[in-house]
Image: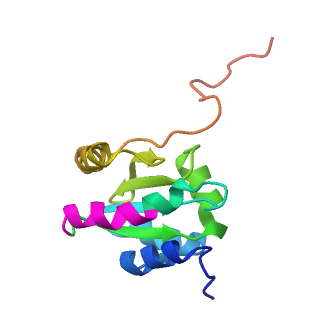
Amino acid sequence: MTIALPHPLLARLAEAAGRTLHNVGELDDQIAEPGDQVLFCGGNPVQYPECLDVAVVLPELLAIQAGRLQAAVVAPELEAAVQARYGFTRWPSLVFLRDGDYVGTLSGMLDWTVFVARFGEMLDTAASRPPTIGIPVTAAATACH
């Protein structure tokens, strides 16, 4: 089932990217693909108007990298799951992955030169653990007090 994206610019981005992710199964399939990837999580364009700016700029950033990475638009119904998985807190966000592993996130609209530089940096950054919410567990409890 295809669900319409909430704005024509987002639909145009999805067409340019070639893929819109609507459910966790599609997300898992996308993540399993080898190579560099970027997931566009725009949020509600009424609440976060910057998402439309990023939707216009992203195809230009992809063109600069000339096929170096795949892009996918995350449909609104899946954005909360992607946010929980990758720990970003601001909309819109571009989540970068490499061979299924988290690389980093760019959030919000940036100046063009900053965007180009940061986009390139993401392609040269090593994969890492995604940020999470909560307190990390460092050792098992050995006794009760």
Q: As drawn, which residue projects farthest toward the top?
A: 145
User: Camera-side residue: 96 or 46?
Assistant: 46
Q: Where is 145 relative to 77, above or below?
A: above
Residue 35 visible: no
Which residue lies at the image location 37% right of the left edge and 55% below the top edge? 97
Quadrant of the snapshot with the C terminus: top right
* x, y percent for residue 21: 52, 73
Which residue lies at the image location 57% right of the left edge and 45% below the top edge? 90
User: Camera-side residue: 121 or 55?
Assistant: 55
Q: Where is 132 relative to 123, above or below?
A: above
* x, y percent for residue 7: 58, 74
The span picked out in magenta is 55-66
* x, y percent for residue 100: 39, 59
Q: Where is 130 relative to 8, above or below?
A: above
Instruction: Using residue 14 as the reference point, say whether residue 89 is left or right of it.
Output: right
The part of the image, by quadrant, that contains residue 96 is: bottom left
Quadrant of the snapshot with the N terminus: bottom right
Instruction: Using residue 23 as the reference point, say whether residue 61 is left or right of it.
Output: left
The verdict on residue 122 being magenta is no
